[in-house]
Image: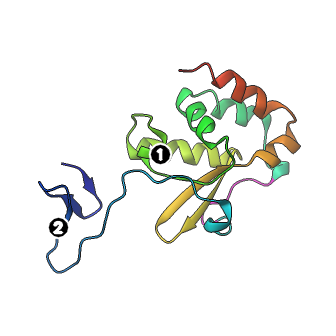
């Protein structure tokens, strides 16, 4: 049975409320990337380092993980992608994916935006290209051979 928050999937495939006093809402299994303008500003609750504070050793250390390289490949289109397991198709738990997003954000590789209860991440391509020219393209070319 697939669980999405307090909503449980009924045998009919439609979500039903676990609490009968509330109305069920639809659970989306996969959302596509949204244009950056629809996500608003970067959330102050999830700050990343300033461009001057991004360190090469930290970036390389974070990108040494194969799961994070696969996340980087998805984010290479420079759009904000929702922080959902289905969006990345990596076969990891939600808590593990959250850990990887945190590591990428704290290294200065991604930016996080919040809209209501939804979080989305995007690559900080311009900041990384300014700080370390050519690094990101080299990493993305090397990551293409992962699968």
Q: Is residue 141 left or right of residue 22?
A: right
Residue 31 magenta = no
x and y, in percent, of residue 132 in the image: 85, 37
According to the picture, the residue beneath numbered tag 1 turns out to be 87
Which residue: 58% across, 58% down?
34
Secondary structure predominantly adopted by residues drawn in magenta: loop
Q: SS class of the residue under badge 2?
A: loop
According to the picture, the residue beneath numbered tag 2 turns out to be 18
Residue 44 visible (yes or no): no
Rendered view: 38 above or below 61: below
Q: Report the Cα–Cα distance between label 2 and label 1.
A: 25 Å
x and y, in percent, of residue 101 in the image: 55, 46
Would you identify the image quadrant in which residue 58 lies?
Answer: top right
Q: Is residue 68 left or right of residue 89?
A: right
Residue reaching furthest bottom? 21
x and y, in percent, of residue 89 in the image: 44, 37
Range shown magenta:
43-50
Q: SS class of the residue under badge 1?
A: helix
Which residue: 69% across, 55% down?
48
x and y, in percent, of residue 140 in the image: 70, 29
Q: Which mark is residue 26?
A: none
Q: Nearer the viewer, residue 49 or 72?
A: 72
Which residue: 23% across, 50% down?
2
Residue reaching furthest front? 12
Residue 45 magenta = yes
Quick one: label 2 or label 1, which is nearer the N terminus?
Answer: 2
Q: Nearer the viewer, residue 8 or 93?
A: 8
Which residue: 80% across, 31% down?
135
| Viewer-nearest of discs 2 and 1 | 1
Q: Residues within 10 Å of mark 2 (few under 14, many from 20)?
A: some
């Amino acid at each position: 049975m697939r669980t999405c928050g307090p909503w449980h999937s009924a045998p009919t495939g439609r979500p039903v409320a676990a609490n009968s006093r509330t109305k069920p809402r639809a659970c989306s299994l996969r959302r596509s990337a949204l244009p950056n303008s629809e996500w608003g500003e970067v959330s102050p609750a999830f700050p990343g380092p300033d461009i001057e504070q991004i360190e090469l050793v930290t970036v390389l250390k974070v990108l040494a993980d194969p799961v994070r390289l696969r996340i980087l490949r998805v984010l290479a289109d420079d759009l904000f992608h929702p922080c959902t397991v289905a969006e990345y198709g990596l076969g990891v738990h939600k808590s593990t994916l959250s850990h990887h997003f945190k590591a990428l954000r704290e290294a200065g590789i991604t930016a996080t935006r919040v809209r209501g209860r939804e979080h989305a991440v995007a690559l900080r391509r311009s900041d990384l290209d300014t700080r370390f020219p050519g690094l990101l393209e080299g990493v993305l070319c090397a990551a293409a051979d992962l699968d």
